[in-house]
Image (spheres, rainbow, N blue to C red):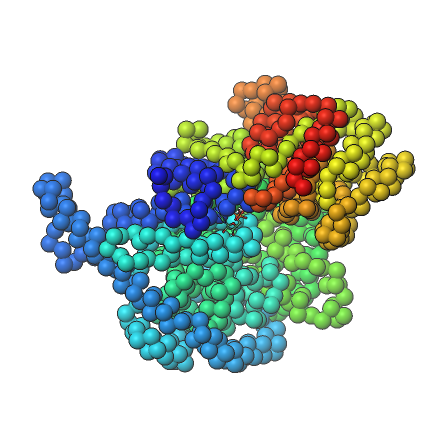
Amino acid sequence: MGKDFHHPFQPYDIQVQLMDKIYDLLNSDKKVGIFESPTGTGKTLSLICSTVTWLRENKLDNLSKTLDNSSLSDSEFTSSDEEPEWVNQFYNDKILKEKSKVLQDYETYLDTLSASNVKPVLRQLDNHDRKRQKKIIKHVDVSLEDNEGAFLPDPYEQDSSPNDSKTQLNDEIHNLLAKIDKGYGVKTEQQLDFTSPLKIYFSSRTHSQLMQFASQLTLPSFPPSSPMLANERIKFLPLASRKQLCINENVSKLKSDLINDSCADAVKKHECQFYTNSKDNLTSKQFRDYTFAEINDIEDMVKLGKSLRVCPYYSSRTALAGAEIVTLPYQHLLSFEVRQSLGIDLKDSIVIIDEAHNLMDTITNIYSCDISLADILSCKELMTTYFNRFKRRLNGGNRVNLMKIMKLLNIIQTFIQKNFERGKEILPQIIIQDNNADLLKIHELVTYMRVSKIAYKIDSFADSKPKSNAPHFNTIKQPVLFKFSKFITSLSNLSTEGKFFFEDEMTIKYMLLEPNMVFKTIVEESKCVILAGGTMQPTSDFTENLLPFVAQDKIVQYSCNHIIPDSNLDTYVVSNGFNFNYEKRNAELVMKNLFEFLEELGTRVPYGIVAFFPSYKYLEQIVSFWKSKGFFERLKGIKEIFYETHGGADVLTEYSARILDQHKGAFIFSVVGGKLSEGINFQDNLARAVVMVGLPFPNVYSSELLVKKKHIEQKIFSAGGSQKDADVATNEFYENICMKAVNQSIGRAIRHENDYACIYLVDERYLIGKVQNKLSQWVRKRIKPQSNTRDVLNETSIFFQQKH
Ligand SMILES: Nc1ncnc2c1ncn2[C@@H]1O[C@H](COP(=O)(O)OP(=O)(O)OP(=O)(O)O)[C@@H](O)[C@H]1O
Ligand code: SF4
């Protein structure tokens, strides 16, 4: 019998293997686990069950370690090596009992909350609140409408900084809380301080993935961390942004870029009652206790906040110390500043990053930025209008800084106009040289923009104007001053971490080139990091580019098989007459061969066939060639055809409808990296065959890739490498991008245990061992022995005959 991970179902073999691997990782001194588990194989539950089992087994130990001796005020004993064994044992038992008692008391208290059926009472409160909230909102609305002063920054002195003031909870709320407590027979004074020394931080890309995690967390139940406890519920906290959690309608209704600053403004001016309430210790503990009484997701947190009339965003911080599992969006985890502001301490914690296949791109995007000439002109227009309107009411500090920003905008405008050359690298100091711009002290301007929230002030001023009265604002769609603020912040970044260069449309872009620097602190601070995803191959991309600072023997890699039986997936390399590299793919013969292959396939495969093409341009070219030769119509006679176009309409809905409708089915031609290659499930009849046309290498002549290539070369040269070494490294880099995209695309088809499909890798280059090694393991191991196209088609017929 293997280890019991308290899985709510009979776990699949591959789940058992994955849970074992994760559990072993946690019991070792290794730092990183890279785990690939195909979609539909219950990855989320495997992650939950293995990590929470480990956490519960180790929690009490850690609690004892972190125990402050002063809390054992009544203890006459202290543990020491010199004491006889029985004395130490007695001491340890005593600590265990005391800690267990704290945990048990808290459980009993939470029992009273959930047993008394919290939600109806909260709903009742919610109704009461709605009426009251209207009053608060009305009050704030009036103050905003009547007074343009709301758009003015506070008087600015060089070292001024925001200062939150604490205010008292109002009487009415006290009364309501007292009523709840009375109802449950529990006094507020009895609320307990409670911390969890071990934590699991689970981060994913989208809101819906975090919601899915919360729902899966409700399924298993775990034994308590101490044998002295009757039960111990999971203490779960879903952290989210203000955009998701804000319950102040004056703020939450704003554009997402404005919410953070608008909230900070409302807090500072005591205009958010929910914030004021959350500063009350008792109320915020109340929020924490309801949060922990059961598994609540982000939407429940909003309801809870509204019911208790406390800000869910700020109150969540009170719950952080006691949480065992915390979910949070990528942006929160990956930014050191955000972690700090939320009070997230990763020490001793297990960090799980789900959907990690795009992690490096995500880090790069978070830390990269750009500004175009058009943005600069919009900023200038906004600033001029704002300045003219308010100049008499601004204090000296604000006036001087606004003039400096105007000056910097002029300098950047001139720089772009004089020097633009697509792809050209720029040294940040060049932008501001020769213009006395160094006198501007960029650091000080960055601080000014952050502290004064001037970008928010100006943007909300522009937003407040009826568009017809301010025609010059009509064309300015997004808060460009935020963009500018991010851009000038990046001007002070280290040039070894990223580069500035010109991109299309008169734009200067800053691109982070060493995402590992950002990730290093996370790996170093935490106990260990788990990178999980459905398609993690090629993992060398992670070890070399994201984790170069972690020794190989501190990294565990594991790739799960699929849950489907072997007979549910065949993979073929279709090589005869197919090479879609740049030189050969435009040959008419290649395009004709592809048509003939698809024509044959269409008669053998029921329902849907999804084909992925390397680019929109190539797909367009093929379609027009086929149309000119009458091939398109012939193919259409076999199955209906839907295809993606760049920026074109959604074709998936119609395609899905057609598949449901007819056995004849349809083709859907998609583009790798396009709308249909990520996040969409082509399960069951939506894809009985997936055809990958060629190898989707990225466009190596794009400005971004040229800059990255140069960066890789420079790194190799400075480590003493030759041009040949540099070429190998850049090719490896391009190949990794390409194969990651292939894995993502072909991974769309098999989505659950009973699903079945065939995968066709159409290009002779898929025969190369190095290329095959970068395929997801569950696909690679199902590649059929090489045969000609005719045999591939015959085997296809047999595959589908066996399924019907
Ligand atoms: N061993 C099992 N037996 C039956 N159902 C299971 C088992 N393991 C997980 N499930 C359930 O199967 C459903 C689908 O799991 P799925 O693999 O899609 O989730 P996931 O791991 O989150 O997927 P993804 O890889 O897309 O993140 C879930 O609702 C889950 O509770
Ligand atoms: S304190 Fe909370 S409720 Fe108030 S504005 Fe900020 S996020 Fe919204």
Identify which residue, 368 or 541, lies in the foreground.
541
Give above or below for 22 relative to 219.
above
**How far across and how far down the image is residue 553, in percent?**
41, 28
Give above or below for 212 relative to 500.
below
Identify which residue, 437 or 762, lies in the foreground.
762
**How far across and how far down the image is residue 586, in percent?**
82, 29
Give above or below for 258 relative to 593.
below
| Residue lying furthest left | 84
Q: Quadrant of residue 510?
A: top right
Residue drawn at 31 percent across, 46 percent down: 57
Residue drawn at 21 percent across, 52 percent down: 96
**For residue 92, side relative to residue 653 (left or right):** left
**How far across and how far down the image is residue 149, in percent?**
58, 72
**For residue 676, side relative to residue 314 (left or right):** right
Tell me if residue 238 can be seen: yes
**For residue 503, side relative to residue 121 (left or right):** right
Q: In the rendered view of the protein, which quadrant contains the C terminus?
A: top right
